[in-house]
């Protein structure tokens, strides 16, 4: 059993360069995360992940010294899998947090647009809104503003704006803004008011979710003293049991 495993490890080391290049191939999931976070993962990120796995793989050498071979093999595999998936999971969590923040801030931003639309076109309102836009939306709104300055009547610019976040409410809002810009104000303004009613519900729901998340954090913090007391109680009981055995 030991010999095939060691041979496999040697073969793995021999093909390190090829495996490293394969590990740099970006999956659709990684590409989606890059779009959401507005970042481009460099080769260094993939290289660091693979090198971490390379270090952990040598845990398999413990089979030479330990009798429980299955335990060592399992420990090595689990360690390598954790090293591979943890960086991606961290990025995925950042992406989810950003989407959640955008879902919260976009209805507020839309209210600002509504005020500006009373005296300006959609394109001008978006330009003026740059002074007040939340930081989490700034990059996307700046891109939209640049595109609309060049082609103010191009529906694609509205539809594609913030499409990467997969929020249906934003896509619907953008279509309404396009209609407001290009097909007359009376009917479009009525539609826009309906949109604001729906986004008000959306904002209220986001606030409730944020409040619930905060409550859950405080609940866990409230559990810490109880956990501490339980640990002290168990330690005291163990001390008593050990002392009884020693006396016996």
Image: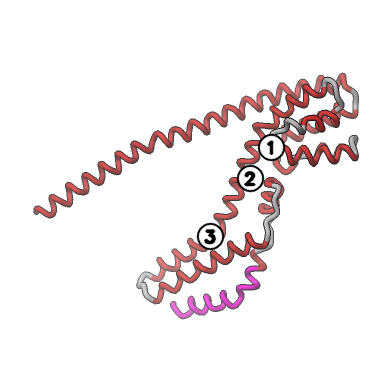
Marker disc for residue 135: 1
The answer to whether marks 3 and 2 mark residues whose Cβ atoms lie closer than 8 Å is no
| Mark 3–mark 1 distance (CA, rounded to whole Å) | 32 Å
* Residue drawn where x is 46% and y is 80% of the image: 3
Magenta residues, start to end: 1-20
Residue 90, above or below 136: below
Kindly indicate the quadrant of the structure image that contains residue 223.
Answer: top left
Residue 226, above or below 239: above
Mark with earlier residue (3, 2): 3
* Residue drawn where x is 67% and y is 36% of the image: 102
The residue carrying pointer 1 sits among few (fewer than 14), some (14 to 19) or many (20 or more) residues within 10 Å by Cα, namely: few
The reply to whether the magenta stretch includes residue 15 is yes
Q: Does residue 172 appear in this view?
A: no
Front of the two marks 1 and 2 = 1
* Residue drawn where x is 60% and y is 54% of the image: 88
The residue carrying pointer 2 sits among few (fewer than 14), some (14 to 19) or many (20 or more) residues within 10 Å by Cα, namely: many
Q: Is residue 244 left or right of residue 175?
A: left
Q: Which residue is mark 3?
A: 83
Front of the two marks 3 and 1 = 1
Mark with earlier residue (3, 1): 3
Mark with earlier residue (1, 2): 2
Marker disc for residue 95: 2
Q: Residue 1: where, in percent of width, then height?
A: 44, 77
The reply to whether the magenta stretch includes residue 71 is no
Residue 82, above or below 206: below
| Mark 3–mark 2 distance (CA, rounded to whole Å) | 20 Å
Question: Magenta: predominant secondary structure element?
Answer: helix
Kindly indicate the quadrant of the structure image that contains residue 50.
Answer: bottom right
């Amino acid at each position: 059993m030991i010999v095939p495993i060691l041979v496999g490890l040697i073969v793995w080391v021999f093909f390190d360069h090829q495996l490293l290049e394969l590990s740099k191939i970006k999956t659709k999931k990684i590409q989606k995360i890059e779009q959401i976070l507005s970042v481009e993962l460099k080769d260094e990120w993939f290289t660091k992940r693979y090198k971490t796995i390379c270090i952990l793989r040598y845990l398999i050498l413990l089979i030479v010294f330990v009798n429980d071979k299955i335990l060592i093999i399992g420990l090595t595999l689990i360690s390598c899998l954790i090293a591979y998936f943890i960086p991606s999971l961290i990025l995925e969590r950042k992406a989810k947090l950003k989407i959640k923040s955008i879902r919260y801030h976009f209805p507020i931003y839309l209210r600002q647009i509504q005020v500006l639309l009373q005296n300006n076109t959609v394109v001008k309102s978006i330009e003026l809104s740059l002074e007040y836009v939340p930081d989490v939306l700034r990059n996307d709104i700046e891109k939209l503003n640049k595109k609309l300055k060049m082609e103010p009547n191009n529906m694609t610019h509205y539809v594609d704006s913030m499409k990467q976040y997969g929020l249906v409410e934003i896509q619907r809002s953008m279509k309404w803004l396009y209609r407001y810009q290009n097909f007359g104000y009376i009917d479009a303004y009525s539609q826009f008011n309906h949109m604001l009613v729906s986004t008000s519900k959306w904002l209220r729901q986001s606030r409730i979710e944020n409040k619930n998340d905060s409550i859950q954090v405080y609940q866990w913090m409230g559990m810490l003293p109880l956990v501490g007391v339980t640990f002290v109680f168990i330690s005291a009981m163990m001390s008593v049991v050990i002392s009884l055995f020693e006396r016996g």
